[in-house]
Image (cartoon, grey):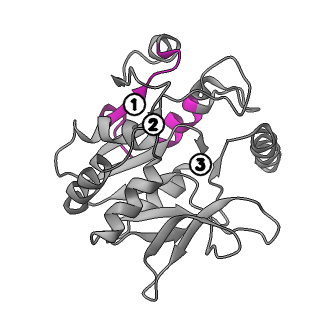
Amino acid sequence: MKIIILADGISTQLGLPQPKPLIPLVTGASLLQHQLEQLRRCVNIDDVIMVVGFKKELIMETWPELLFLYNDLFATTNSAYSLMTALRKTGQEDVLIIEGDVVFPADVISLLLTQPHSAIAAMAVSANEKCQGYSTDAQGAVRTLIQPAPVLKGIAPGITRLLGQDVPKVREALLRCEPDATSEEGFEYAIERGLRLYPVPVYPLYCLKIALLKDLRRINAFLSETRQLN
């Protein structure tokens, strides 16, 4: 299995000078360091492929042992292009796809890896939360990944496990995407062509995407509370 981390974007919404993977968390670890520490508990880090772009040298100098792919069009492309860049380097083996701004524990990864089908990590959505997430069909498979509230079944923070047999469907779908399309749009194209992707609820575990400063404050508060309990 290959593990793809998409970490090439510019963190414009956060307004911070460093790339997202280097954002410090309250634990003292950077966001990427936290991801790698959790991944080491359940997968082989030698299988990680990281897509980098914005200030790539800072990331590559910090973790020279990782395999990096450079997206030289990071300023004008989005996550669909980044994912396609990485999937060109994989075969038909299983793939674990992680957005570079998601904070999670190892148990979330372990849970996804036990599933008999392609799956996404899923969190509940509160009634007043303004976000985008997924909806499902009558069989419980993901129907859409970019639905606005209030038709959401939940939030998909950005961790997907694809079975090897489903990887070609996703590759083909990503080729249809515009350069500025998101990976979620690519997955929706693949779903239209037969991909069966199932949400896996991970609550009470945490799996949170850091898109805004309020998200960073939220995850830091959660990590602080967790450390105190331990």
Does residue 123 show up? yes
Q: How far separated are the C-alphas under marks 3 and 1?
A: 17 Å
Q: Quadrant of residue 13?
A: top right
Q: Which residue is labeled 3 in the image?
A: 104
Q: Residues within 10 Å of mark 2 (few under 14, many from 20)?
A: many
Relative placement, left or right, of 14 versus 42 is right
Q: Which residue is labeled 1 in the image?
A: 50
- Residue at 67 percent across and 69 percent down: it is 124
Instruction: Between label 3 and label 1, give the one nearer the viewer.
Output: 1
Give me the disc on residue 6.
2
Name the amino acid, label 3.
Phe
Q: Residues within 10 Å of mark 3 (few under 14, many from 20)?
A: many
Label 2: state its secondary structure.
strand
Residue 15 at x, y percent in the picture = 74, 26
Q: Is residue 125 above or below residue 11?
A: below
Name the amino acid, label 2.
Leu
Q: Which residue is more in the foreground, 80 or 208?
A: 80
